Amino acid sequence: MNFIRSGKTRIRSTFGRLRTHHSGRRGNAAIEFALVTPIFAVILAGGLDLAMLVFSRFRLEAAVSNSASYALVQADMVDAKNSSDLAEKLAVMIASEDAGGNKHASIVVNNGASADYNGTKISIRGMPGRGDACYCPSGSAASLVWGSARTCASACPSGGKAGKFVVVTVKQAYTPLFSSLGIVKGDSIDASAVIRAK
């Protein structure tokens, strides 16, 4: 009988130690959870912020791409008579995709007629008479240098041929959650295209 009693005592002693060890682990899990949760929250917020930036950038690029496609299809409008109408139609396309009113667009048709959209209204300006000239522009869409008018299809200094061009530039206000990281410069994102119409 002593043998059975000593076995029961050992079992009770072992289970007692396991209970003590198990209850101590509950406290460890709570501490680990408290330490890891803020790290996961920051990673989740950063991922969400980056996803929203990419989504906004894709929408902006889509607006510019749609305008560029329309300009290519309507290449016959790049002339002295219709260039103001083309600039206005491109601005209307961009404005129709701007639900929040936070986009600003500038469209220049062949260094002449242009349209500006400021988030609320479209204004037409420029000289549509230049629509019949051909140019050899250089630089990027944001800082395009038109140069002087040339004979259409003549050789350009850069190696291409003189033609008629449409420039579309769109800028949208965007402030990320983590603005201190410098992912977005100047609290806005932009997209632009230079389209050779003819």
Image (tube, rainbow, N blue to C red):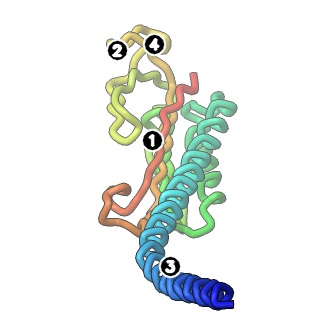
Measured along the vertical axis of the image, is residue 159 above or below residue 53?
above
Q: CA distance from mark 4 to mark 2?
A: 9 Å
Who comes first in sequence, dot 3 or dot 4?
A: 3
Identity of the amino acid at label 1? Met
Who comes first in sequence, dot 4 or dot 1?
A: 1
Identity of the amino acid at label 3? Ala
Residue carrying label 1: 127
Measured along the vertical axis of the image, is residue 69 above or below residue 13?
above
Q: CA distance from mark 3 to mark 1?
A: 72 Å
Who comes first in sequence, dot 1 or dot 2?
A: 1
Rendered residue at 32%/26% (across/down)? 147
Q: CA distance from mark 2 to mark 3?
A: 67 Å
Residue carrying label 2: 158
Q: Dot 4: what SS?
A: loop
Identity of the amino acid at label 4? Lys
Q: Nearer the viewer, residue 74 or 158?
A: 158
Report the mark closest to the observer, 4 or 2: 2
